[in-house]
Image: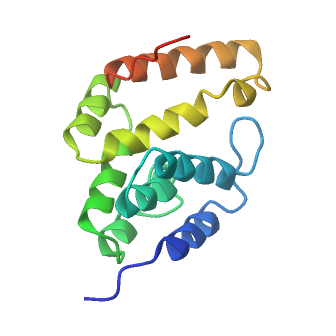
Amino acid sequence: MTEPLTLAEIEALARTAHEGQTDKAGRPYAEHLQAVAEGVRTQGGDADQIAAAWLHDAVEDDALSEQWLTEAALSRRTKDIVRAVTKRAGEPPETYAARILATPGALLVKEADLAHNADPTRLAVLDEPTRKRLTEKYARMRTLLGLVRNEG
């Protein structure tokens, strides 16, 4: 068994895998990955969850392959979380949410992902139809995951 990758190695790998990619607001994609990893860390997530946060979009965005994930020197839990939060083509949101809820540790990663995606400062730079569509999409996923925000 090879030594597991360190969080620093996973961060570097994720940054390299997403090199040149930007988010919907045109920002470097690594900023989103860093925000999600930091969100997981500040909410008390462990090393497996922080690693999964760095890698949460890698397979979905074809930055890294499923085969890479299978063979990577990562804990089984990290791999399980990455697979849980990876959306599959044509998959209903209810199925996606159920898989996240059924995978230990995955909810915190998805919650941090949604929190950053729904950040008003990020959404503010988008055109109105896109902002409205994404706001509704994120709110629906939060509801499916039981993450109802208390305002006030």
Question: Total of numbered circles in the picture?
Answer: 0
Corner quadrant of residue 117: top right
Residue 121: x %, y % from top left: 74, 28
Q: Is residue 89 above or below residue 138?
A: below
Q: How is the image coloured?
A: rainbow
Left or right relative to 42: residue 92: left
The quarter in which the N terminus is drawn is bottom left
Task: Identify which residue is drawn at 27% across, 55% down.
Answer: 80
Residue at 31%, 33% (x, y): give it: 96
Question: At which x and y percent is residue 11?
Answer: 56, 67
Q: In the shown orientation, is residue 143 left or right of residue 124? A: left
- Is 73 left, or right, of 114 in this rendering? left
Residue lying at the far front in this picture: please name it. Answer: 152
Whether residue 145 is situated above or below residue 17 in the rendered picture:
above
Q: Quadrant of the C terminus?
A: top right
**Residue 4 at what x, y percent from top left?**
36, 80
* Residue depicted at 70% across the width and 25% down the height: 123
Q: Nearer the viewer, residue 14 or 40?
A: 40
Q: Is residue 56 visible?
A: yes
Relative to 35, residue 74 above or below: below
Residue farthest to the bottom, as pictured: 2
Q: Nearer the viewer, residue 25 or 121?
A: 121
Up-down relation of residue 115 to residue 76 (above or below): above
Q: Position of residue 140 (x, y in %)?
A: 43, 16
Looking at the picture, tell me which residue is in the foreground, 47 or 135.
Answer: 47
